[in-house]
Amino acid sequence: DAKTTQPPSMDCAEGRAANLPCNHSTISGNEYVYWYRQIHSQGPQYIIHGLKNNETNEMASLIITEDRKSSTLILPHATLRDTAVYYCIVRGGTTDSWGKLQFGAGTQVVVTP
Amino acid sequence: DAGITQSPRHKVTETGTPVTLRCHQTENHRYMYWYRQDPGHGLRLIHYSYGVKDTDKGEVSDGYSVSRSKTEDFLLTLESATSSQTSVYFCAISEFPGAGELFFGEGSRLTVL
């Protein structure tokens, strides 16, 4: 699976949108971009994933560039409960992937009042 | 939230003793996984299961064994615990093996003295 690069940390003001970047320049055609987050001392939580098109759900939006070499996770109205480590993961869509999520260091997001 | 329960949540044991961690799910998902999380290493896949009695190794399987006699239960056993196995262990489940989200449990913190 392709490797991802994320900034180590970022701050966001409560109520503002948080835009989390991720580079995945070696992504291949059948690989998906996943985002998870981990709130301190809890298990990782799935946020969203996409292949080519932008995606939106109740938690966030995922914007994938046309060349698919980077993506941005958008938390539209950050709250204090969104403080967490956010992981951008690239994973194949075949059975060979078998849950083999390669969690890197992620981005520590701190939402401040 | 997905119905995943890990037990015990915390355990302290001594080197050389056997330890079994249990993951119980109520979602009837076919696929189950055990990860460990350590500072500087992120989450690493230990073993996974793609059905009752069907299991396979992940990237850090040495020193661990697993069993799955029922859909809802996935057991991780350390036959003879070592200090290097001190970690936080997470169980995860998924409905599909390839694309799709993983749902994680709350983790089991194991300390081997």
Image: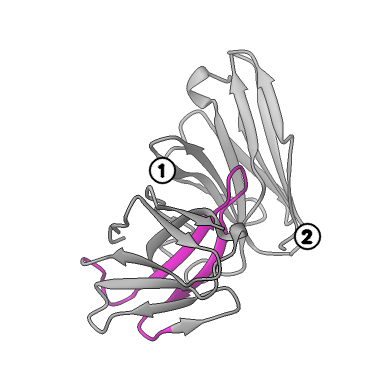
Give left or right: position of B84 versus A6.
right
Is residue B22 magenta-colored? no
Q: Point out the stretch of residues depicted in magenta.
A: A26-54
Image spot of residue B51 (x, y percent): 63, 58
Image spot of residue B21 (x, y percent): 68, 35
Residue A41 marker: none
Classify mark 1: helix, strand or loop: loop
Residue name at image x 49 percent, y 63 percent? A13
Residue B59 marker: 1
Q: Is residue B51 above or below residue B101?
A: above
Crowd class of label 2 (few under 14; some 14 to 19; many from 20; radius 10 Å): few
Asked whether disc 2 touches disc 1, contact meaning CB atoms under 8 Å apart, the reply is no
Image spot of residue A111 (x, y percent): 52, 57
Asked whether A18 or B11 is in front, the reply is A18
Residue extending furthest toward the front: A113
Residue type at numbered disc 1: Glu
Crowd class of label 1 (few under 14; some 14 to 19; many from 20; radius 10 Å): few
Separation of marks 2 and 1 at Cα, in angstroms: 27 Å
Is residue A36 magenta-colored? yes
Q: Pointer 2 indicates a residue of which chain?
A: B
Residue type at numbered disc 2: Thr
Classify mark 2: helix, strand or loop: loop
Asked whether B98 or A69 is in front, the reply is A69
Give left or right: position of B62 versus B30.
left
Q: Is residue B103 above or below residue A31?
A: above
Quadrant occupied by the C terminus of chain A: bottom right
| Residue at image mark 2 | B26
Quadrant occupied by the N terminus of chain A: bottom left
Q: Pointer 1 indicates a residue of which chain?
A: B
Task: State whether residue B79 appears in this view.
Answer: no
Please tell me in which quadrant of the rendered image residue A81 appears.
bottom right
Asked whether A89 or A42 is in front, the reply is A42
